[in-house]
Image (tube, helix red, strand yellow):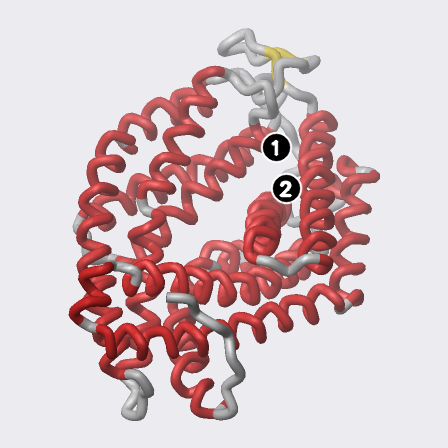
Amino acid sequence: MEVIPMADSNHSGQRNALADPLAEARSARSADSNGDAIHELQAPSRRKKSRPSSGLPQEWTRVCGLAMKQLDRCVSLEPKVLQGDNPEAVHDLRVATRRLQQVLDLIFPSPRPREIRKLRRRLRRCRSSLSEVRNCDMLLERVDAALARKRTAHREARRAIRQYLITRRAATFEKALRKLTRANLSELYVRMKEYLLGHGGPFPAGESVDHHSGAPTPSVEQFYAHIGENLKTMWEALEEQMACSRRKPEAPVLHRMRIAAKRLRYLVEVVHAFGVPGSPEALIWLRNLQKHLGHWHDLVVFEETVIAMIADPDFLRDHMDLALEIERLILRNRVLKVKLEGKYLEATADQTDLQRTKDWVSRIIAAPSAVFIHA
């Protein structure tokens, strides 16, 4: 059934029915997804001036420690995920795998060792296996928040959507469980720990040599230069996607922009761990950018899911009136989605914060060693 967008004259009713439940449903998730970053902002680790006389540079040891922190988090979250009834654990595990993969990409540039390529693939499989489960959890939070209100439009439609999501989550969780079990995070932990703590260093070309493994290790200057190169690459990707999204704010383009912002943020979190001035402000700007795109993405997922629900011939045959009511929800959803796209465009049009972040990135790219050493 074709859905035709149309204007909604009752804006206050629309906000009560959708906007407020969306904000309520995301509040806990936003706090949780930013928890690690906020903790790091409050107490960044400081770089020690002394260096060991032999072995690995302290900087290498520190960034390996960041990887181990996320690896520990992955392993500790797995039992909670396997219980099946902990939506926050599902979300936290996906975030931890993203952060771990970002640090690994920083430590091991292309071409990466074969072992690291295998570990990265396993992290991606672990994350993707829980993607649909996470979408169902997010939508259930949103629907439950709406149903908890005393005055909620389309209550029967929302109840039907809720039951559909419960059934869908159960089915997708069974599939995710099998994939997650095959990923074997415990084995991943052992193998990655041995590699991070026993391997000589991140780069194939280095001047010093680790006395334990005989493998080349990077100099401190090489290490900082590599961070600067990564920051340059990710900032350019963000600017490219931002320009595309302003010219053509369509779903695929905005989704790529969302991913680019997420990747850059996780890299800036690593920079912040070294106590680099300006990194807290950069993280705040990136989080605000992600907030607009995150709300927008939730509405995209909602629309795709409920369209799949009412497209079922059996559902249409037995619940035609309910299907029409759900279509009206989709139309309201589209109005909100357009508004959020406008908020994102307004946020990226504000040149003050954008230019400040760009200047900060440019300073690190121009002289990474100087910026880190004086942090």
Callout 1: SS: helix
Residue 200 in the image, given as x and y percentages of width and height: 53, 16
**Taking 27 as reference, is 237 left or right?**
right
Callout 2: SS: loop
Residue 245 found in image quarter? bottom right
Q: Residue at x 67, y 54 (%)?
A: 279
Residue under circle 1? Answer: 59
Residue 65 in the image, given as x and y percentages of width and height: 48, 36
- Quadrant in the picture for the N terminus: bottom left
How far is disc 2 from disc 1 in space, using C-alphas? 8 Å
- Identify which residue, 358 or 9, lies in the foreground: 9
| In the depicted structure, whether residue 70 falls above or below residue 357 | above
Task: Say whether residue 12 is visible.
Answer: yes
Residue under circle 2? Answer: 47
Number of on-image labels: 2
Mark 2 in CB contact with mark 1 (< 8 angstroms): yes
Residue 315 in the image, given as x and y percentages of width and height: 20, 65
Q: Residue at x 62, y 47 (%)?
A: 264
**Taking 257 as reference, is 72 left or right?**
left
Q: Looking at the image, is mark 2 or mark 1 earlier in the sequence?
A: 2
